[in-house]
Image (spheres, rainbow, N blue to C red):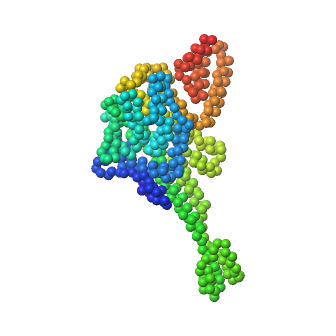
Amino acid sequence: MINRLRDLFRRPTQASGASAQVDDSPGWRSLSGRPQDYDPARLQEIYADALEAWRKNPIAWRIIAITTDYIVGDQISLNSPLKSLDRFIQKFWHHPKNRMPLRLESMSDELARAGDLFVALFRNPQDGMSYIRFVTKDRIVAIETAPNDWESEWYFYETLEGGGQRRWLSPDAPESAEAEAVMLHYAVNRPLGALMGESDLTTMIPWLLRYSRMLEDRVRLHWAVRAFLWVITVPGNRVREKQEQYRTPPEAGSIIVKDESERWEVHAPNLNAGDARHDLQAVRAMIDAGSGYPPHWRGDAGDISLATAQAMQNPTERHLLRRQRHFIYILQDILYHAYRRAVEIGAARPLPAAYESGASGAETGPGGLYDYLFRVHLPDISRYDNQALAQATRDLSQAFASLGTQLPALSPTLGREALRLAFKFCGEPLRPEVLDAILAETHSR
């Protein structure tokens, strides 16, 4: 596959592309020993295929760019209700060696393009601040997990430029507290039981190849259309004479005067270009199915109406919302482990025991502990959601107001549930203690 990609994308400019260096020596071993994972050579090939497609194919590039445009949006920021953790977050986020606002796009690109993100945190022993760096997927040759838990990754083995390997410790490794640096691993499109994820482009690459070749063939044929032949019919006794006369074809714009015995015809290739339309559309449909993005997102409006376009966006936005939640979890996890490593050397205040145990009384969300510790400010996946949520909140509030008039007396329990659901339906659920504070303030007046 990778050789076909290079042959295709290098024509006609012969531009050099990235190449994967695969070591076929007996030193190669299975990445994890689990049947769900590819061997390292195959992983490198898939990674190089996706990188080559992203660099050379406009559709592949645009698919990754669309994902990042929606996931990162205008900007993502995080803070914490805990003052010590919040100070650390702001310092880490804007540190000159981290510059997190500038890294978010490349992190999202790599996660979608490679399917894996390997994050290295280097701890400064003086102030406990961690500096973030990245190791590309093609350099990881093995992952070692806990003996009885394949989801607990302990060690990562990286191939070095000059030969040999480096072993990275994960925060779960027994000796990680004393390590100068640790590595965090995040994956998407990962089959259950596998340690490595897969690129968003993996299923599309064969169809991107076919589409590129079909387009290239059409371009070559259209170039051939410009070559045509003049066929001149004359009486048999004048054939030799006219051959000599028209041995040099007339230039464009020339005027030729002939009698009625001479007939000119032009012969050019007939491409039947309309026949190729449906084939090209079928291949594009396979690409769109693999990306999950409707065709008008990549500029192919076709015969799609406004109503159809809006209906096509719903499943796409749900997919992007899932990816955005996963990306937010990655950022929270990085911040959490960076702070914990500062705590390990006494450079930061330990988290309160109630937060560590999840017993702070806050409402639990998909992120578990991280929903207690972090407040995330992120862009909306869909602007239409705000209007729909506002409409739902208004209708729900009116329904509860009508219900309240049917009861013989005011019900504090109903009021609390109405308040909780109103904020939930508007997309901003409140923690129980905030609801209690609002109701207490209301009853005190």
x, y (%) of residue 433? 53, 19
**Where 250 sits versus 28, above or below?**
below
x, y (%) of residue 276? 57, 60
**Where 243 sits versus 208, above or below?**
below
Task: From the viewer's perspective, tell me whether residue 391 is left or right of residue 4.
Answer: right
Q: Quadrant of residue 277?
A: bottom right
Question: Which quarter of the figure is the C terminus placed in?
Answer: top right
x, y (%) of residue 178? 32, 30
**Between 151 and 88, the one nearer to me in the picture:** 88
| Residue located at (34% from left, 33% from top) | 180
**Between 68 and 292, the one nearer to me in the picture:** 68
Count of marks placed on residues:
0
The residue positioned farthest toward the bottom in the image shown: 237
Task: From the viewer's perspective, tell me whether residue 167 is left or right of residue 213.
Answer: left
**Where 274 sits versus 92, above or below?**
below
**Between 147 and 99, the one nearer to me in the picture:** 99
The residue positioned farthest toward the top in the image shown: 444
x, y (%) of residue 258? 69, 81
The residue positioned farthest toward the right in the image shown: 260
| Residue located at (48% from left, 49% from top) | 54
Q: Quadrant of residue 74?
A: top right
Q: Is residue 224 visible?
A: yes
| Residue located at (66% from left, 27% from top) | 395
Q: Quadrant of residue 1?
A: bottom left
| Residue located at (59% from left, 14% from top) | 441
Q: Is residue 371 visible?
A: no
